[in-house]
Amino acid sequence: MTSFYLTQSLHRTIQQKPGGLATSFQGRRQTWTQFGDRVARLASVLKELGVGTGDRVAMMALNSDRYLEYYYATWWAGAVVNPVNSRWSAAEVAYSLDDCETRILIVDDAYAGVVESLRAQTRVPLTVLYWGNGETPAGMRDTEALIAAAAPATDAMRSGDDLAGIFYTGGTTGFPKGVMLTHLNLASNAISNVAERIVMPDGVTLFAAPMFHLANGAAMLASMNLGNATVFVPSFTPTGVLELIQNEGASQMLLVPTMIQMLVDHPDLKKYDTTSLRHVLYGASVISEGVMKRALEAFPNAGFTQAYGMTELSPCATILPAWYHTNEGQKAGKMRSGGRATFTTEVRIVDPEDREVARGTVGEVCVRGPGVMAGYWNKPELTEAALRGGWMHTGDAAYMDADGFVFVVDRVKDMIITGGENVYSAEVENAVGRHPAVAACAVIGIPSERWGESVHAVIVLKPGQTTDADAIMAHCKTLIAGYKCPRSVAFVDALPLSGAGKILKTKLREPHWAGHQRNVA
Amino acid sequence: MTSFYLTQSLHRTIQQKPGGLATSFQGRRQTWTQFGDRVARLASVLKELGVGTGDRVAMMALNSDRYLEYYYATWWAGAVVNPVNSRWSAAEVAYSLDDCETRILIVDDAYAGVVESLRAQTRVPLTVLYWGNGETPAGMRDTEALIAAAAPATDAMRSGDDLAGIFYTGGTTGFPKGVMLTHLNLASNAISNVAERIVMPDGVTLFAAPMFHLANGAAMLASMNLGNATVFVPSFTPTGVLELIQNEGASQMLLVPTMIQMLVDHPDLKKYDTTSLRHVLYGASVISEGVMKRALEAFPNAGFTQAYGMTELSPCATILPAWYHTNEGQKAGKMRSGGRATFTTEVRIVDPEDREVARGTVGEVCVRGPGVMAGYWNKPELTEAALRGGWMHTGDAAYMDADGFVFVVDRVKDMIITGGENVYSAEVENAVGRHPAVAACAVIGIPSERWGESVHAVIVLKPGQTTDADAIMAHCKTLIAGYKCPRSVAFVDALPLSGAGKILKTKLREPHWAGHQRNVA
């Protein structure tokens, strides 16, 4: 029996839109027939280089049409993608490659320079494919030459519970873990996301967030299901995105809220014709009402949809549809939630003993369904703990309202326990963020002899604005209970962000917790 | 790992719309919480009656809220549905029950009377549950009393490749075959159908076609994914449907084209308020331009979507979206096609050696994907033949155009071979149907000493109209090649229809072919 297979959408699009535009990148344009041909040839190259069924193939590169070819060629060859988080240190990347015994690494011009350092740190010998626009460096293979010389392979037709990808996560929380996702995991989530309309039919999809990350991957797989044309910015910049909207008629993209904020606050925004933009999917965190208001004004033709999820969920678990972001829909009061369980997930909120809690009570978000990962690579104990009872335990603290909307309040382990009270940093961040001088902030717990932990705010001010800790604390006291207000404040130029745009609270905590032991759930 | 499971949508809807309307039938109304409670109690009843994991449970009934409860209670109990085609003879039904060793049969008031005859013909002893509104007949159990006394069961959580249903088909073509469909088969098709918008969100779904058939099943499972309220007509009548649209605000339903025709031609149509009707899904055959025109006029708020498929495909393979049925969209010239491969299917057209044919060439429709059946119950040779090479061979003859649209021209075995030429009955039927006096027609091949087969038309005239065979033949010669025109014509009062509303050509052929051998592919 045939189950889900990730190459199906490509077969179908080649059949239905053979001459339609598949990709456009920096002047290179190709049809779906041409794209399919290059995928089948690159698959052949991989097999000739010894990639067997189920073997891992890594890519470390900025966004481009070739990144899309890499995903589909790897699956076409029957192999498993291992997309490299290029924001990690060489030591972290080397660890992730070795951990799952990846022997093939594809690099572009941006990352060819780190190959030497990676080779020095990996145990498993690497065959490196150079896929750039210059001369092939010594010790690497010329990918374009290999593709040109290859005969197209036939689709290996891996499917169902066959492994499709290992996605390393954990940059924000410790040593990387390889999340094993099957064809069923990823393809079931993709079709559910199409049903949820996280990507719209008949559009041009812009890849602006990093293609190594599954947040963008959700948009990519949904877009491939729809057979949309795709365009790419190598790495997010507001003007890079605005130019592609204007010049390529890009109609939709995935962004994280910080990217949306950078876009709508960009001084040149009005110089661009952005009327083609119809839809923005965002994730990783909720969006503030202020940014949402500016975004609706900046892009009046666009709807905004939020997705909540994680790599382990392939990745989407809940969706907040565009309607709830409109001026009318905001009256429903759901905009600060991540939405409701998607068509392929069940979500429940549990206490530490895995009992479902009452609506409105904070607990841990658990998810069940075909998108839940097969497990962590080579980590059976971690897998068993995360998937106990058949539910993925996300580590996110949230409550559910009467209509099933999930309001994520924190990471379970980011919750601050101060004087015996639970404080959710998100609530404090909302309060701090409403101060007119504040551009961004993060709230963490820091060691306190008296309270166990005390609430600490790290703040980035808006350009030209000034304020002080006392003013911030006084402001917060008008909005939230006294014990939730920051007891200390630090002003910084920027917050440390992960590849997915999440604030790295671990980094913020490090200087405070050196020499202390933090007890986390 | 958890794969797809058919009870997931029910869990989700109870969570998201606990007080929302689940079903309304003849004055009985219940919320999703109440519906879920009855499902869990009926599951408990089944288990107490000895239904084990994977055992079959049959129901023989007209449409009602209880039919929906039966489907979900059977799955909740970990068992397998075997919905009985109530239009079959008692002998055929008895065969299908025995074939897969069904021991539990649920009947309503309409079919309680055939139980004695069934029991006389089945080898396997039947426990019969009476689920009607009268006194429980002797020898049967009182289903409502059992439900009232039962404690709710917990969901057995069958999923993925676990068997979910055995659907008997073959009424039109010979002895019944039990099509085995898994949770993955049915649930993957359902989510794809939601993505294709065969059923719309936030609506009231009307079940007008028989609930034992998977054509209605496609609408049912998509509707359950969306958590729509559901209303029911026991058995299709135009006024029954019109009343529910008016009184319950029904917004969508599945019909077959003959039902659409009966609706739009009904003399009382204009007496009903049908403004709530927003969407009609139809299948089993294409719709004539004349009927489509009248339907668009009759229901100006409604879109029409066609689905092509079969039970073995869970059931949808291609979809023709609503836009192609609009006055604007009809200019694309796709309205006589069944549409394109859905999000979970691949479709190709092959010659008798399973080689893909060129676009525009007629061959057999083959389908691959997670919706393709596990096989025919207890028929390994038939299964192997139907699924050879990993593709379901549908027996339908079709061609595909340059954009991937599939135009079904005939059943492979209904193709008429006359004087060495292939004649597709659908093409002849279209020509005959354009005669102003013709209400409906079917074209078959009948034995001919000279031509092998000759083209024969069976015609139902519109009320008050008259014409003759010569006029029909002359009319056809103005539209199609001479060898395709009927060489004989019969006028009848009505055409024999299957439970799914398909014309039973076997029945039409029988009198002509008695004593002859017909060679079919």
Image (spheres, coloured by chain):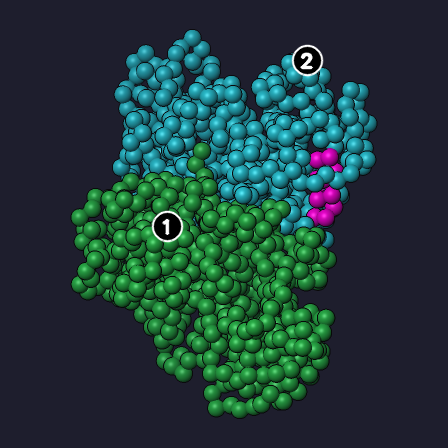
Chain colours: A green, B cyan
> Could you tell me the amino acid type at mark 1?
Glu
Provide the residue designation for mark 2.
B120
Instruction: Please state the extent of the stretch shown in magenta in the rendering.
Output: B32-44
Answer yes or no: is residue B329 visible.
Answer: no
Chain identifier of the residue bearing label 1 in the image: A
| Left or right side of A294 for A117 | left
The structure residue drawn at horizontal position 51% and vertical position 58%, both measured from the top left corner, is A310
Task: Determine the residue located farthest toward the front in the rendered image.
Answer: A515
Magenta stretch prevailing secondary structure: helix
Residue B284 on the magenta span: no
Crowding around mark 2 (Cα neighbors within 10 Å: few <14, some 14 to 19, many 20+) is few
> Could you tell me the amino acid type at mark 2?
Ala
The structure residue drawn at horizontal position 38% and vertical position 70%, both measured from the top left corner, is A236
Q: Secondary structure at mark 1?
A: loop
Q: Secondary structure at mark 2?
A: helix
As measured in the structure, the alpha-carbon distance from the residue carrying label 1 to the one carrying label 2 is 65 Å
Same chain under badges 1 and 2? The reply is no
- Name the one closer to the observer, B311 or A450: A450
Answer yes or no: is residue B50 visible.
Answer: yes
Across and down, in percent, residue B261 comes to 53, 38
Across and down, in percent, residue A437 comes to 55, 87
Across and down, in percent, residue A287 comes to 54, 71
Across and down, in percent, residue B361 comes to 29, 34
Vertical side of B381 occupied by A337: above or below: below
